[in-house]
Image (cartoon, rainbow, N blue to C red):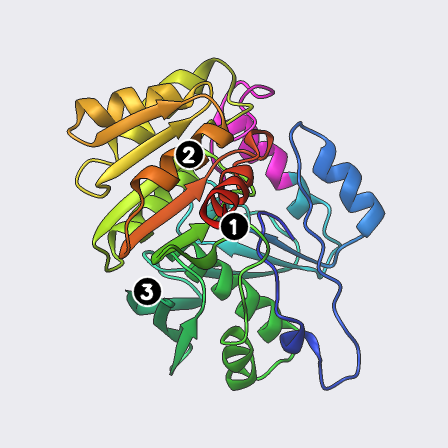
Amino acid sequence: LHNHCSLPLSLLKLEKRHQVGVFEMGMARCGELAALARVAQPDTGVVTVVAPVHLEFFHSIREIARAKYELVEALPRGGCAVLNADDEYVCQFGRDFHGRVITFGVRKPADISAHDIQATRAGISFQIRFQDRNLPVQLSLIGEHNVHNALAALAVGLHHGVPLEQAAEALASITPADKRGEMLEIAGATIINDCYNSNPKALNAMVDALAKMPAQRRIVIAGEMLELGPAGEPLHQSCGAQMAGKVDVLLGVRGLAKFIVQSAAAAGVQAEFVETPEMAAEWLARNIRPGDLVLLKGSRGVRLERALERWRELIAA
C-alpha cells in the first residue's frame, strides 16, 4: 500500500477467517516499486497521489507517475487496483488494467466518495456515498487528504467482503501514527505533530486543514523539504505564497525553508527563519501562547521532532 494509507486492523478481520497484510511500498527511483512487488506479490494495490517528491531522482512529475504505475502493472490478472479519481495521473492508471478497478474521490465521480466534509479541532467528519447508500464517519485525523486515505481503506475492505457499516465503524477507531498528525497539548496550545516527513503537496494540504480549524492563532513550523532537486527553491517559494490568508505566523527551519519564509513574508505572513530544530524550540518557548494551533511539518532528515523534545525540556526547567 502506497503513500502512508494504513487500514485499521478491525477492518481486516474478515468473515472468511483470513486476514489481509498491508505493506507500504515506498520508492525514490524507477524500478523500486516493481522490485518490492516481486517480493510482496500483492493482489490489491492502492495508489493515492502523484506528488512532486524525490524530484532529485526524476526529471518530471510524469516520470514519478510512471514509477508509481509499476504497482498496478505488478498486480495479477484478476487483481484489484484502488485508485484516486481526483488525482490527474492516478485516475488514468486503470485504463488498461486487466482486473477490477475501484475508484475513490471527493471532487470527481467515483465508486466510493465523500461529501459534507467538515473540519473540527478533533479531526474531520464526512458522509460516505457508496452506490445508493450514505453513512456518516468521524475521523480522528486532520485534512481532506485523510478523507481520501479513509476512502481507499473502505474500498479495500469492501473488495474483501467487509460490510460497509463495519468498515465505517472501524474508521472511527483510527488514531494518528507517531509523528503523523498526532494532536498534542503543550503550554495551553494545540500541537499537530506531523513531522515524520514532508513534500510540497503534503505541506499545502496540512496548511489547508489548519486554516479550517478554530484557533486564536494558526502557526506553522515548516522544515526544509528534501530530495526536490533543482525544483527545490521554487517549490518552497510556492508553498510560502500559498500560506497567505491561511497562516498567522510561520517559522521556517533549516536550508531551503528560508524560501518558504521569504515568499510567505512577501505575501503578508509574519515569518521568521532559524537554522536548527533546537533554535525552533527556543522560538516556541518564547512565542507560543494558550489557544494557539501549531503545525510542525518537515522532511525526515530535518528531525523536527527535536524541536518538541527540547521545548518540553525548556518548559520543565
Q: Name the residue under label 1.
A: 48
- Picture coordinates of residue 63 (x, y %)? 55, 27
Q: Please name whichever residue, 278 or 47, is drawn nearer the observer in this view of the structure.
A: 278
Q: Please name whichever residue, 284 or 224, is drawn nearer the observer in this view of the structure.
A: 284
Query: Vertical placement of 254 versus 145: above or below?
Result: above
For mark 2, give the secondary structure. helix
Query: Vertical placement of 230 versus 214: above or below?
Result: above
Q: Distance between the residues labelled 1 and 3?
A: 25 Å
Q: Mark 3 points at which residue?
A: 121
Marking on residue 6: none
Q: Nearer the viewer, mark 1 or mark 3?
A: 3
Q: First in sequence: mark 1 or mark 2?
A: 1
Q: Which amino acid does label 2 sit on?
A: Glu
Query: Vertical placement of 291 versus 19: above or below?
Result: above
Q: Does the magenta stretch include residue 103?
A: no
Q: How far apart are marks 1 and 2 (CA)?
A: 37 Å
